[in-house]
Image (spheres, helix red, strand yellow):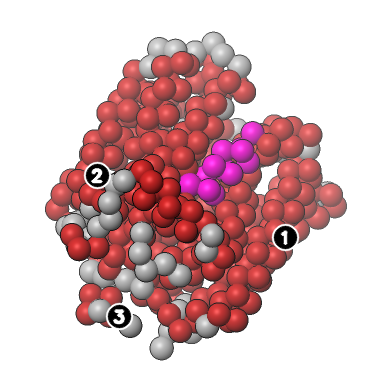
Amino acid sequence: MTTDILSRPAPLRIAVGLGLITLLGPASVDMYLPSIPVMADDLAIPYTTMQLTLTVFLLAMGGGQLVFGPVIDALGRRRPLLAAIALFVATSLWAASAQSVESLIAARFLQGLAASLALVTAMSSVRDVAEGVRAAQLFALLMTIQGLGPVLAPAVGGVIGEAFGWRGVFLALAALGVGVAANTLANLPESLAHDKRSSLNLSAVMRTYAGIVSDRRFMLPGLALAAVFFFLFAYIGGASYAYQTGYGLSPRDFGFVFGATGTAVLIGAMASAKLVTRLRIEALALAGALAMLAGALIGLFSALGGVGLPGIVTGMFLALAGLGIAEATLMSVALATRTTALGASAALLGAFPLLLGAAATPVAAMVAEIGAAHWLGLLAATGLAASGLAFTTARMVSRHGLQVGLQHG
C-alpha cells in the first residue's frame, strides 16, 4: 500500500528542516514568558492585559491553520512556507519596536498567523513523505526538536531579557526566523506533487472540512490530542504564578525550572521514536496519556500533603514525558486515517488543540491564583480526559483494523 517514497526513511535534512520550522511556535510562546511582568511594567499595563499577547497568539496560531490547510493543499508547501517565515521575521521585528500594548497585540496576532502557516505546512509535509511507523518516527523526531523549545526557550529568554531587555527577546526570535528561512531554502524541496493538489474553491473547502469532521476514525484521536494540548497549555498558563508566587521562585529560577520540566517532553518524544518499533502505536499513545494522569496526581498529592515544589516538579516531569509520547503517537494515528486533503486534516488537527489552549491559559491562571492544588487538580482532570479518549482511540483502531497501516512490520 506504500509507494517508493513512502517505503524509505525521510532524509535527515528534511526531518531536521521540518523540526526547525516547528520550533517557531513554541519559541514564540516560551521565550518571552519570563519577561511578561517586566513588559507589563514597561508599558504601564496590568499583568492580565499583557497575557492577552499570549492569548491572541494562540488564537491566531490555531484558527489560522483552518484557513491555511486548504491553501497549501492547493498551492503546494514550499512557497507558502517561505512567505510564512518572512512574515514571522517581520512581525518579530514589529513586536520588538512596539511602543504600546495595542501595537504589541497586533504584532503577536500576525506572528501567530505566520507560525500557524509554518506549522501546518511542516505537519502536512510529514505525510507527503512517510506513513505508518515511519511517519510516527518522523513525528516523534519533530516533537523531539520541537521539545527543545520548552527546554531552552524560557532559560534563553530569561538570560536575553535580563541582559538586553524584553525587546531583545523578540529580536532573537527574528534571528531564529532568518536561520529557519536559510535552512528551508537549502534543504526543503517541494513535497506535494501537482497531481495531488486540490482546488481552492470555498464550497469544496467546506465540503472537505465537513467530511473530515464527520470521520470518527480521525476525530477520536484528534480529540485525544486536543486534551493533551489542553494539559500542556494549562501547565504553561498556571506554572508561572504557581511557581513564582506560590513557591517563591525568581523569574530567572522559574525559567530554569520550567525548562527542566520541559526536558521531559523531549525525553518522551525521543522514547516514542524508539518504542514505536516495538509497541503498537495506539497502545503507546494510551501509555503516554496515563503517564500524564499519574504525574498530575503525584503533583496534586504533593501539594496537598505538604511535600511542596520538589514533589510537584517530579510529578510534572513524569506528566510531560507522557505528553511527549502521546503527542507524536496520537498525531500519527489521526493522520494515518487520511489519504487525501492532508493539509486540511493537519490544519484541523493543529487548530482545535491550539484554540483550546487559548482558553486553557487564562483558565489555568485564574485557578492557579486560588492555589497550586486547584491548578494541579485541573491538570489531573485533563489527564483523566486524555486517558479516556486515548483508550477509546485504541479500541477504535483495533476494531476497525487501522493497525494494518500502523504496525511496525
Q: Which residue is mark 3?
A: 2
Q: Residue at x 37, y 30 (%)?
A: 110
Does residue 402 belong to the magenta stretch?
no
Q: Residue at x 31, y 35 (%)?
A: 88
Q: Which residue is mark 2?
A: 80
Marks 1 and 2 sit apart, C-alpha to C-alpha, by 38 Å
Marks 2 and 3 sit apart, C-alpha to C-alpha, by 27 Å
Q: Amino acid at mark 1?
A: Leu
Q: Which residue is mark 1?
A: 384
Locate residue 345, reporting x and y percent: 42, 57
Categorize mark 2 by other alpha carbons within 10 Å: few (<14), some (14-19), many (20+): some
Indicate whether 119 appears above or below 46.
below
Locate residue 123, reporting x and y percent: 37, 57
Categorize mark 3 by other alpha carbons within 10 Å: few (<14), some (14-19), many (20+): few
The secondary structure type at the circle numbered 1 is helix
Do we see residue 320 in this rendering?
Answer: no
- Left/right of residue 200 with respect to residue 65 in the rendered view: left
